[in-house]
Image (tube, grey):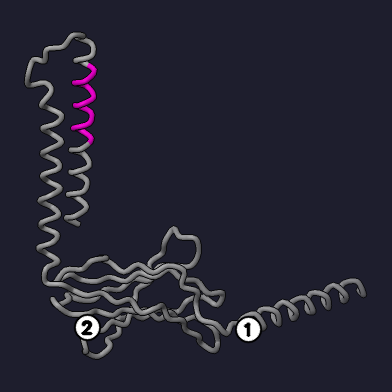
């Protein structure tokens, strides 16, 4: 009987100790969530684009939410509630929001605030990100796309050209080797141009 009483008393003491430790840990949380990554896309926005913000954050008390703050030109700051998305990241979760479309010839400022689940809530802010929306952004992207297309065409020409004429060579094997090398080089140039053109259209 005494042994059972001792075990019960030890169990109660252990539960009280663990509860006190948990309470101390929670109330000891006086800092906001740790925001370890911020993504603002697109990197070079054009007029009419939607701008999205994604943060990855963690907190020992849990993250209760996040707010995206944006300001266009000299206007007022506007707040957007961010939505939680699970992720295969190192820790914590991903919070996402977007706003727009953004006008031309103006400056856009963005930052994010994350909040924890502590009994006395804490928050943390990211730095303020600033970008200028130029009316020439669309034209610049068109020029880049055209240049990449020209590189693609040049690569095709370099790859095909060696097979469109009958070369005169002292050594036939050297001719074939040169043709093969030029074909591989042209194909590589074409692939680089195609990939660059695809990236510029995103």
The magenta segment = 177-188
Given residues 105 and 42, the one toward you in this image is: 105
Residue under the image location 12 percent in, 64 percent down: 138
Q: Earlier in the sequence, mark 1 or mark 2?
A: 1
Determine the secondary structure under disc 2. Answer: strand
Q: Are marks 1 and 2 in contact (CB under 8 Å)?
A: no
Judge whether residue 181 is colored magenta. Answer: yes
Residue 159: numbered disc: none
Residue 185, image x, y percentages: 22, 31
Instruction: Tell me the CA gap for discs 1 and 2.
Output: 38 Å
The answer to which quarter of the image holds residue 126 is bottom left
Image quadrant holding the C terminus, namely bottom left
Q: Mark 1 highlights which residue?
A: 28
Q: Is residue 58 left or right of residue 51?
A: right
Determine the secondary structure under disc 1. Answer: loop
Q: Is residue 124 left or right of residue 131?
A: right
Above-or-below relation of 99 to 93: below
Residue under the image location 16 percent in, 68 percent down: 46
Q: Mark 2 highlights which residue?
A: 72
Residue 36, image x, y percentages: 46, 69
Q: Is residue 192 left or right of residue 83?
A: left
Q: Is residue 110 left or right of residue 60?
A: left
């Amino acid at each position: 009987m005494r042994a059972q009483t001792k075990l019960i008393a030890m169990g109660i003491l252990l539960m009280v100790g663990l509860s006190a430790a948990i309470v101390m840990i929670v109330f000891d949380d006086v800092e906001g969530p740790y925001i370890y990554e911020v993504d603002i896309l697109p990197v070079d926005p054009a007029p009419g684009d939607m701008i999205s913000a994604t943060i990855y954050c963690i907190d020992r008390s849990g993250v209760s939410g996040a707010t995206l703050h944006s300001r266009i030109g000299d206007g007022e700051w506007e707040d957007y509630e961010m939505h939680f998305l699970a992720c295969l990241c190192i820790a914590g979760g991903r919070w996402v929001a977007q706003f727009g479309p953004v006008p031309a010839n103006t400056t856009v400022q963005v930052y994010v605030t994350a909040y924890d689940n502590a009994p006395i809530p804490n928050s943390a802010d990211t730095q303020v990100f600033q970008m200028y929306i130029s009316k020439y952004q669309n034209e610049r992207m068109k020029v880049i796309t055209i240049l990449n297309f020209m590189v693609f065409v040049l690569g095709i020409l370099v790859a095909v050209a060696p097979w469109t004429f009958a070369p005169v060579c002292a050594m036939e094997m050297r001719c074939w080797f040169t043709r093969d090398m030029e074909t591989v080089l042209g194909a590589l140039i074409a692939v680089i141009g195609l990939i660059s053109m695809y990236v510029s259209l995103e």
